[in-house]
Image (cartoon, rainbow, N blue to C red):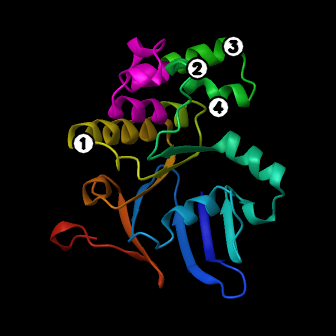
């Protein structure tokens, strides 16, 4: 579903700093992978490039047969809106909207009919265990609950690809376990592919495959006990 070849990205003016060098990655539909790496290794930049939020200096990103780097701004926006879901460490819930209204945002942007929107929002809130919280506001929720709302929002429009940037970074162990379980369950149920970038070995341990990103490239990582 996703094929990345020779992806490179630098930042800076007269003396640019290389963040990503010749990255290759293949991701199959239904696959759930984790990418680990030190701060500054380019994990978030890689997600931004995959989503078309930024453009690479070199390389290609083929998403379901579409070359993302060849699309204009409008086409990349439509691709994200229809086919990609995001989960961020900072939640990014809108405080003036209820839980249900936050979850409904991707469907509203895609102009889904109200009946479909209501049904999908109810389904996703039930799936993450927050059906009773539909009418409350984010300030009334715990960190783990807010992250589950963010997962419901990211998956409500049934995206083919889920991108999660440090989804458990602000959570305690119990909340992190709940969030990871919901994330994995929902991606499997929707047959979506998922890329999770993380510093956490616990989070990475839930993935089908773990990769390490360094300034030299993207490489398979070893799990505890030496298992790839």
The span picked out in magenta is 123-151
Q: Where residue 169 sits: x, y (%)? A: 35, 50
Q: Say which quarter of the image contains residue 52.
A: bottom right
Q: Where residue 46 sits: x, y (%)? A: 56, 65
Q: Secondary structure at mark 1?
A: loop
Is residue 135 rendered magenta in the image? yes
Q: Residues within 10 Å of mark 4 (few under 14, many from 20)?
A: many
Q: Nearer the viewer, mark 2 or mark 3?
A: 2
Q: Nearer the viewer, residue 38 or 72?
A: 38
- Label 4 – label 2 distance at C-alpha: 10 Å
Residue where numbered disc 1 is placed: 172
The reply to whether dot 2 and dot 3 touch (C-beta < 8 Å) is no
Reading the chain from its start, which is encountered first: label 4 or label 2?
2
Of the 4 image quadrants, the one containing the C terminus is bottom left
Residue where numbered disc 4 is placed: 106
Reading the chain from its start, which is encountered first: label 1 or label 2?
2
Residue where numbered disc 3 is placed: 114
Specify the label residue 15 is tagged with: none
- Label 2 – label 3 distance at C-alpha: 12 Å
Q: Residue at x 45, y 41 (%)?
A: 187
Q: Residue at x 55, y 75 (%)?
A: 24
């Amino acid at each position: 579903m996703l094929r990345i070849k020779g992806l490179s990205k630098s930042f800076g003016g007269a003396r640019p700093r290389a963040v990503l060098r010749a990255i290759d990655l293949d991701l199959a539909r239904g696959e759930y992978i984790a990418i680990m790496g030190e701060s500054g290794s380019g994990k978030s930049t890689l997600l931004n490039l995959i989503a078309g939020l930024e453009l690479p200096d070199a390389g290609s990103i083929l998403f379901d047969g579409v070359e993302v780097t060849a699309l204009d701004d409008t086409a990349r926006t439509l691709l994200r809106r229809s086919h990609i879901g995001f989960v961020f460490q900072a939640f990014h819930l809108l405080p003036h909207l209820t839980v249900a209204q936050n979850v409904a945002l991707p469907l509203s942007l895609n102009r889904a009919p109200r009946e479909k929107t209501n049904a999908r929002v109810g389904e996703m809130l039930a799936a993450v265990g927050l059906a009773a919280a539909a009418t409350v506001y984010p300030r009334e929720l715990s960190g783990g609950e807010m992250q589950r709302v963010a997962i419901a929002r990211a998956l409500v429009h049934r995206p083919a690809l889920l991108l999660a940037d440090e989804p458990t970074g602000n959570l305690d162990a119990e909340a992190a376990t709940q969030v990871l379980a919901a994330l994995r369950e929902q991606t499997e149920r929707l047959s979506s592919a998922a890329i999770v970038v993380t510093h956490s070995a616990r989070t990475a341990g839930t993935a089908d495959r773990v990769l390490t990103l360094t300034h030299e490239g993207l490489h398979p990582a070893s799990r505890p006990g030496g298992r790839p």
